[in-house]
Amino acid sequence: MTVRVRVTSPASLSNLGPGFDILGLALADPADTVEAEASDRPGVEIVDVTGDEGLLSRDPRQNVAGVAAADVLARAARTSGVAPAATGLRLWLTKGIPIASGLGGSAASSVAGAVAANEVLGRPFAPLELVESALAGEAVAAISAHGDNVLPCLLGGIVLVRSLAPLDVVSLPVPPGLHLAVVHPHCQVPTSEARALLKDLRWNLSDAVANAANVGSFVSALHTGDLQLLGRSVADRLVEPVRARLIPGFDRVKAAAQASGALACSISGSGPTVFAFACDERSARRAAAAMEQAFADAAGLASDVYVGQVNTQGTRSIRHVRSGTRAGL
Amino acid sequence: MTVRVRVTSPASLSNLGPGFDILGLALADPADTVEAEASDRPGVEIVDVTGDEGLLSRDPRQNVAGVAAADVLARAARTSGVAPAATGLRLWLTKGIPIASGLGGSAASSVAGAVAANEVLGRPFAPLELVESALAGEAVAAISAHGDNVLPCLLGGIVLVRSLAPLDVVSLPVPPGLHLAVVHPHCQVPTSEARALLKDLRWNLSDAVANAANVGSFVSALHTGDLQLLGRSVADRLVEPVRARLIPGFDRVKAAAQASGALACSISGSGPTVFAFACDERSARRAAAAMEQAFADAAGLASDVYVGQVNTQGTRSIRHVRSGTRAGL
């Protein structure tokens, strides 16, 4: 008899306009899944990876889910006082989130790996204690630690990361009407390249002040449900102007979203995914169609499209008991 | 029979830690007062200024209250369609707010001048329409337009100025327990000098991001009443480190506030006034005493001290009818 846990970690939007490195929200889909079982062999083994088009490493030291899981395993052995329920883990990773899309795929796999390990080990850690392991996973993908994908992916909802060290996270209310249109055009913007563009730039104080004001009004709008204010607050004078250049057709896509009646439009993470906020499902569908069409017209790009609400559940795990031998796993 | 209006405009704290140029709150006291009457003589006449130790100009074109009132008068003549109730104004200004203290004294006199003119003219403008006239007044004091003093002074409460042009202002909730300790040491930090220090500086993205995060958590804390989070959010990596140098003993004053149990401590505006947030009146009194003592010990400075809650009323006006002649006014 074998217990297997299945952990589903959603895609997430980060930055959300003015909130570079500090604001993020969880999507209903797509999602990455990690299944895990205890193993007699110490350490982490990645049995299989599917849905990644062969792009990801099966070496657990090079795979974000493997690294996050190994970090949980090592910390449990080091800190729990009692021996953890297992010394080894076998993992199966299924990528549902496109790679290098700006949808927080590395964060999702990392979170799923960390949560799966924690479940198999009998939950030695509270959810927020898994953040450092998930960030250790993300680091393998050359993503520096910010948590604006990891936290919403883990907790669900809309999250403000006030500080990572010490960890200080604010879960923000989700207005009932808020809908999302998310469009992932089929082109690549490696996170490392998008971040390199920012590395040596220094901004004017006035731009920093404008972004801080928009973060403040964004947060207030979530608390009061003022979707018009929310829309006005999705304005980024720091990062979007730089990153927009890496996304073919971005200006036309944003204009199309705005013309369709969306509340706001910006880049998710380092792109190329672009999102819009809308006040109802119909408006979100209209915005998604307009943005998809604009990517096709302006840059000849096909896109994946997601329409829905904020996922307030975050990462979910299911334990199921499998009878029989482990053969074939 | 003469109608005289008496307008009281409170001092205000601006910046509030991370919110340089965008966050401010109104204090219960001190306050500036403008009294005004209609006059047959076109334009604005400043009859008297008291409480300023002779520092302020009586020339209405050089006095912030005079300029703000004149701006309202000119706009009313230009835009109202019907003739305004008066073509001239006589003003009496009483300064209760120390000059160049960081307590928004110029903003208070400007707001009082604008509101008084509007009252005498029969209220041609809604309160928010007076902001541009108040900012025109502040400009005379070489204060560039930000509104982080003018808006809380006018509206009361805690205000986020998302944008000045177009005007987009968010009134934030005031947690019931929140108390303030405000200490104004007797030294001068001219606003223009404090701002000149900032003019050519450019900040790292990480500092801008940290400040934006703190503005976001500050706003969320006001909505949820989480005073501990509010306290952690009063952290400024942009401006406080630069301006602290202009305030003798600041580091020891801040340390004294924190040691006394205050939630947070920072500089108001360009200083030298320093404020602390506290979770009740007793704690605010303790913080005020500790800060006052630290200014004395560290820099040999005497201070004015104010302890109280946020003033949610803002600028108040009273009309009263005086019988008899105008002789003696």
Image: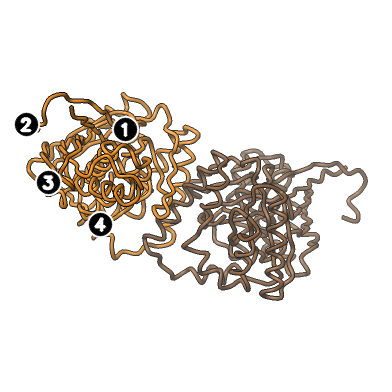
Chain colours: A orange, B brown
- The residue mark sitting in front, 4 or 2, is 2
Inspect the image, locate mark 4, and give the three-letter code of the amino acid beneath it: Arg
Inspect the image, locate mark 3, and give the three-letter code of the amino acid beneath it: Leu
- The residue mark sitting in front, 4 or 1, is 4
- Image point 76% across, 58% down: which residue? B96
Q: Which numbered disc covers residue A180?
A: 1
- Image point 16% across, 24% down: which residue? A323
In the displayed structure image, the side of residue B174 where residue B300 appears, left or right: right
**Residue that badge 2 annotates:** A328
Chain identifier of the residue bearing label 1 in the image:
A
**Mark with earlier residue (3, 1):** 3
Chain identifier of the residue bearing label 3 in the image:
A
- The residue mark sitting in front, 4 or 3, is 3
Q: How far apart are marks 2 and 1 (CA)?
A: 41 Å
**Mark with earlier residue (2, 1):** 1
- The residue mark sitting in front, 2 or 3, is 2
